[in-house]
Image: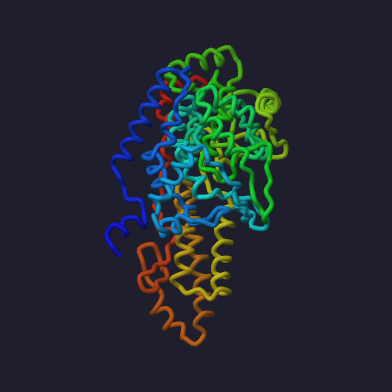
Amino acid sequence: MGTACKQAVGKLPPDPVDTRFVRDMHDKLKKWSLNDRNIKFDDLWNLVCNRRTLREAWRRLKRNKGKRTPGIDGLTFKMIENSIGGAAMFVEETLTMLQDGKYKPSPVNRRWIPKRGKPDKLRPLGIPTVKDRLVQMTLLIMLEPIFEADFYPTSYGFRPKRNAFKAISEITSILKTEATPGSCWVIEGDIRACFDRIDRHLLMMAIRKRITDKRILRLILSFLKAGVMEDGWIEKPVTGTPQGGIISPLLANIYLTALDARYSTWTPNPHESAEDVKKRRTIHVTEGMPTFYIVRYADDFVVLAHATKAQAKQEKTALKEFLWSELKLELSEEKTFISDPRDGIRFLGYDIQGIGDNISLTIPPDKVLEAENFIKDTIHKATIKQQGITELTKVLNSKIAGWAAYFKYAHNATGIFRMLDEALMTKMQIWLSEVFPHMKWGAIREKYFLETPHGQTIRSGKARLRLFSQTTMATLPMSRQAKDSKAYRGECR
């Protein structure tokens, strides 16, 4: 095969020019949006419908975990790269379709997967085609810096340089610096089927506050209306954001910014100084008025109330009315609680309990049980599928590394990790004795067991079974608000 042919088939190589172009445009859009809160963008199409943007979008998509899963057309990234013309030709075809006005999103491929922590229950997973993911990524690249200027600092989900741990850190910081016994209550909010019930008309109205380019608006709306395919049948829901869409988290944040804005009297506004927030909050506190502070991660949120329990209940009722009247969303009564933080609250998988200097952050028992069940189920499946040690180790290591990395901030992590290591090794010993019934136990131990600084583990060639205890414990990263706490907190003490 000739050199020219080899270059035409395969992956899209890195290109500093593409990356620099996208980064420069990102910075410009962000700057313009920050400098003028009322600016509207009416000519974004040429940035989205751009070869360099599409090529950079492809490279970013390639780093995503779901790249191996096909949409309704059956195509995967690997299949495209191995085809004649490879990724470069695929990008060019997509660009031409956009330029000619022939691009139309396909319905997403709906699959059902076990709910996390509830393996007996299923949840829908939407898988867009590779082409639709590519176009959505180009939209995300150009829209994200514009709307970031409007997002509140108390929103942490699916945003640059923000994560679940900073959201948890924000909550613990407030409970440490503001909470007083009997006058601190937490509304643990739950919105029923939030992403499926987003009102598209209201969403498009929110988007039009910044975007007036009709071609971009039509493209976003086409994704909203694309529908889902299951067992050959196409459904077209009239509400909700695209299932599994690259752009869906951004659209949800745009929509739910109204919820953050509801508490703007007591929380920092976008790019507001800490001193201004302090002045507003001080006025309410000195006059004996309640204050409410929201911390949101996508559709998961808590409202920390410096108020009486009766006032917290009133706010819960008012919040329910607000969500329905302003956003057409429903607050789940059975899953929304008013809790005393001294008794504990649950947020993003962690149990948070206490106020002042006595705050604990722990791994809930049901999450430990989930990990134990995964170990048991994975090893059982390995027996049924007759998997080898190397393949089983690979599956276990991925889950163990992710689970431990998420819960390494818990105060009880060290003990829990050791307990799970013991359960893991016990299950593995039983499995090895069943896989090699004719080998003496001493021979099995000599061949497959390995002593490490973290304890005994399993080896097979170069493969090593990862232990939970290999993950180093850590303290929570400070949120931006936590870093500024000296400037505007403590007035409730």
Nearest to the observer: residue 106 or residue 309: 106
For the point 39% across and 55% down, the residue is 85
Q: Residue furthest left?
A: 3
Q: Quadrant of the N terminus?
A: bottom left
- Left or right, 93 with respect to 13, comes to right
Q: Is residue 430 visible?
A: no
For residue 237, above or below residue 287: below
Q: Residue furthest bottom?
A: 438
For residue 416, above or below residue 390: above
Nearest to the observer: residue 210 or residue 292: 210
Where residue 45 sits: x, y (%)? Answer: 45, 31
Where residue 462 sits: x, y (%)? Answer: 35, 70
Q: Is residue 23 visible?
A: yes
How many numbered discs sit on the rendered protein?
0
Nearest to the observer: residue 323 or residue 422: 323
Q: Residue furthest front?
A: 100
Where residue 465 sits: x, y (%)? Answer: 42, 66
For the point 45% across and 21% down, the residue is 488
Nearest to the observer: residue 412 or residue 206: 206
Structure colour scheme: rainbow
**For residue 56, what is the image quadrant?**
top left
Where residue 393 sits: x, y (%)? Answer: 45, 67
